[in-house]
Amino acid sequence: MWNFVGRQNDLEGKMENTRGNWISGISFIDNALLGNQDKMPTKFKNESTVKFFFLPLILGLMGFFFPVEQRLWKILCPPFPIYFDQFRNCFLYRSQTF
């Protein structure tokens, strides 16, 4: 979700409220998920904090569902084999046992 919504900081976390979560920039969503972000200590706030406000996620979903809704299969079908092939190759590469 970091790439599509936003990043709290670049610290690696293990399900903690102050390290490595995704944040949207919309305060009521962030406060419900992680608590009040204004009260977070300054040592956890750094220049890697990015707030995208769900825009890349929304635009990506619109880019997928618009051709489906308009039945523009000529736009949707050519990239599908490329993504499917990448998924299959990654799956085969990661599932090898030696």
Image (spheres, rainbow, N blue to C red):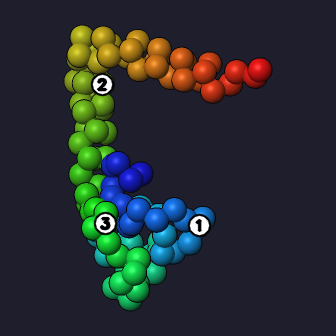
Disc 3 residue type? Thr
Q: Nearer the viewer, residue 88 or 20?
A: 20
The mark lying in front, picked from 1 and 3, is 3
Q: Secondary structure at mark 1?
A: loop
Q: Residue at x 26, y 47 (%)?
A: 56
Of all residues shown, which one is farthest toward the bottom?
Answer: 39
Marks 1 and 3, the one that precedes in the sequence:
1
Disc 2 residue type? Val
16 to the left or right of 55 = right
Residue 36 visible: no
Marks 3 and 2, the one that precedes in the sequence:
3
Q: Residue at x 77, y 20 (%)?
A: 98
Q: Nearer the viewer, residue 2 or 29?
A: 2
Residue under label 3: 49
How packed mark 3 is, by other alpha carbons closer than 10 Å (few <14, some 14-19, many 20 or more), is some
The image position of residue 22, as x and y in percent, is 41, 61
Residue under label 2: 68
Q: CA distance from mark 2 to mark 1?
A: 36 Å
Q: Secondary structure at mark 3?
A: loop
How packed mark 1 is, by other alpha carbons closer than 10 Å (few <14, some 14-19, many 20 or more), is few
**Location of residue 82 by image quarter:** top left
Residue under label 1: 15
Q: Nearer the viewer, residue 6 or 10?
A: 10
Query: Taking 75 as reference, is 69 above or below it?
Result: below
Q: Secondary structure at mark 2?
A: helix
Disc 1 residue type? Met
Q: CA distance from mark 3 to mark 2?
A: 34 Å
Q: Residue at x 68, y 24 (%)?
A: 95
The image position of residue 78, as x and y in percent, is 30, 11
Query: Taking 63 as reference, is 53 above or below it?
Result: below
The image position of residue 76, as x and y in percent, is 29, 18
